[in-house]
Amino acid sequence: MCRAVLESEADGKAAEAINDGIVYLMVFPYLLVGGVGFAIYRMMRNRTKS
């Protein structure tokens, strides 16, 4: 249904907005995993120094 609506639009603005929204939503899991990984890295690094 969504695909049919997006393909029927002439200018493609809605399709571009949908794609931007998907990319926006995909960024957050990577940021969360990266943040947790960085926190673990810093914890391990500080543990070996002391």
Image: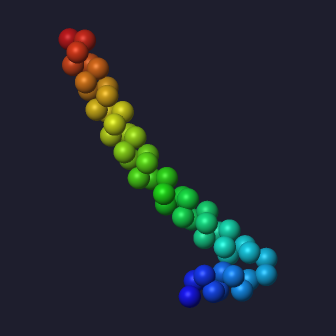
Whether residue 33 sits left or right of residue 3 in the image: it is: left
Whether residue 22 sits left or right of residue 28 in the image: it is: right
> Is 42 drawn above or below residue 24 in the view shown?
above
Q: Residue at x 37, y 45 (%)?
A: 33
Considering depth in this image, is 8 or 47 the residue closer to the camera? 8
| Rendered-image quadrant of the N terminus | bottom right
Whether residue 8 sits left or right of residue 32 in the image: it is: right
Q: Position of residue 17 (x, y in %)?
A: 65, 69
Q: Residue at x 54, y 64 (%)?
A: 22
> Is 4 drawn above or below residue 13 in the view shown?
below
Whether residue 35 sits left or right of residue 12 in the image: it is: left
Location of residue 49 (image quadrant): top left
Q: Position of residue 20 (x, y in %)?
A: 61, 63
User: How was this image coloured?
Assistant: rainbow
Q: Residue at x 68, y 68 (%)?
A: 16
Q: Residue furthest right?
A: 11
Q: How many marks?
A: 0
Q: Residue at x 48, y 57 (%)?
A: 26
Q: Position of residue 14 (x, y in %)?
A: 67, 75
Q: Position of residue 35 (x, y in %)?
A: 38, 39
| Rendered-image quadrant of the C terminus | top left
